[in-house]
Amino acid sequence: MSPNPHSFVARMPNEPGALHIAAAVLKRHNGNIERIQYDTRIDPNIVFFELSAEGDDLQAALDELDAMGYLRRSLPVPAYLKFDITLPHMPGALFDFLEKITGTGTNIAYLDYDETVPRGGPLRVAVVIDDGSRANKLLDNLKSIYPLEIIEHSSVNEDLDSNVFYVRFAQEIRSLIPGVNEDFLLGFLHESNHIAQELTRRGEDPRKVLRTILDSGRMLKDSVKPGCAEVDTIEVPGGEVHCIQFPCGGNSYLLNIGAKIVIDTGFGSYREHLIDCIKDLGWQLDDIDAVLITHGDTDHCGSAWSLKTDVHMSPQAYDIVSHCDRSHGSESQGGLLETFYTRMIGLFSDADDVGDTVLLEGGNGSMHGFEIQTEIDICGTRVTAIKGRGGHQEGQLFFLFPDSNMIFTGDSLINFSTLSEERKEYMTLAKVLMTSVNVDSVRAKEERDLLLDLIRAYQGDSGKPLMVCPGHGGVSAFKDNALITWH
């Protein structure tokens, strides 16, 4: 594949030879098709291309396709029309009517007429117009020739799914990411289709994949509302910890243990709710001594740079956020599913741009099978940053607070029994789009087992229970070789 193939979306008539005609145009202008995807189960009129061609040849090919009406340059709002129309009782009447419909590029959803039954009456027609701005022109044209009564005229209808699915999909995306332009929508549509194509090869239903993309955005958008942050306050040696669970994505923790520390921040879309929680404690943003980030997933650092204080993370996590690829640094770096998911969820969740960051580097010994990334002193509060093994994500850190008997495990330890149904549903959507939330599932299991060994050994050495603060779900304890709710 060439380094930068040109992507474009073709709107072609659903008739024999249409694709062959488009391929002939591309061949005539020395274009090499590097990816193509067409699936009538989703949309019978849309074909996705990636094409390599030189500048003048590329432009000539696109211009010719555009002149033929084959090139999709915009994604207007579609319209659905249902009307009763009275045709003259004469041979060829239906043919003449259909010719007028076809000439406007309109898709017929259904026709219903049978003069042999007693009801008789006009012909009932439902049509889909992918550019709703042409709907009135079509109606005016038909009204000038035939008696016509409009039954329904709307821009959204489930009947669109089987006719202009991708156009409607784009409109849904427009509502989830306000202010986007047509070029962005076409690009996002192309990336979404690429994801659907890849998962189809793996046995996934493409329509399910595309709906999951929308469901992820809708769930996030609908979840952002007053009172969406669920706060649990727990006393610990030296102060207290406040666990904030948002409806979607990861937890955030506010620690008041001599130092005021925020660990992980949740999605960017929850930033105002996180800040409200901080202020409800009587803190100001200037009071926060440090923000610590366990790893580079957007649901753990999406608001990090909005808190206006030092953000601490590993160099690998910083690279993940900077490159917008949650698999960066792993064997699957640059993988289609991982990179698309990272970009998509960042857009849906309004993630912060990367700002000034304190990189936690070093290498200061080991602890029960893990390397110690570094030791930190935050206003007299000791923190041991333990380096993960790259199972869930490269650069994930576990933060141990030995004086308060707490460990923050990111996404390597989660007590799933504490998750609400809404949070479980959201995590399922992520798994559909990536097939696995871990960049290395084998390492992820090793990492989890070692982390449990570390907790077991720590509790044996200190004689004290270690509070487990996971990336998702409720604060837990490790007892009898199982995670249980902390009491």
Image (cartoon, rainbow, N blue to C red):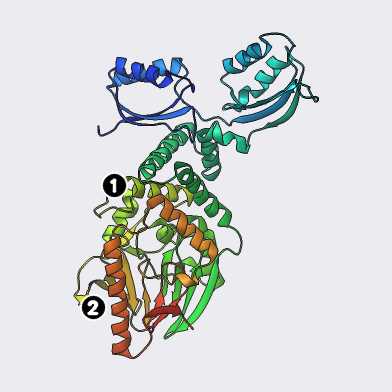
Q: Residue flagged by tag 1: what amino acid is it? A: Gly
Q: Is residue 422 visible?
A: yes
Locate residue 308 relative to residue 336 in the image: left or right.
right
Q: Residue at x 36, y 81 (%)?
A: 481
Q: Residue at x 49, y 74 (%)?
A: 242
- Furthest toward the top, the residue is 91
Q: Which residue is drawn at 48% across and 20% down?
A: 15
Crowding at dot 2, Cα within 10 Å, few <14 / some 14-19 / many 20+, comes out as some
Q: Name the residue under label 2.
A: 368
Element class at badge 2:
loop
Q: Where is residue 239 in the image (x, y as percent from the top left)?
A: 45, 83
Q: Mark 1 points at which residue?
A: 334
Locate residue 264 relative to residue 115 in the image: left or right.
left
CA gap, disc 1 and disc 2: 32 Å
Depth check: 177 or 382 in front?
177
Q: In the rendered image, which quarter is residue 137 located in?
A: top right
Q: Where is residue 170 in the image (x, y as percent from the top left)?
A: 51, 37
Q: Residue flagged by tag 2: what amino acid is it? A: His
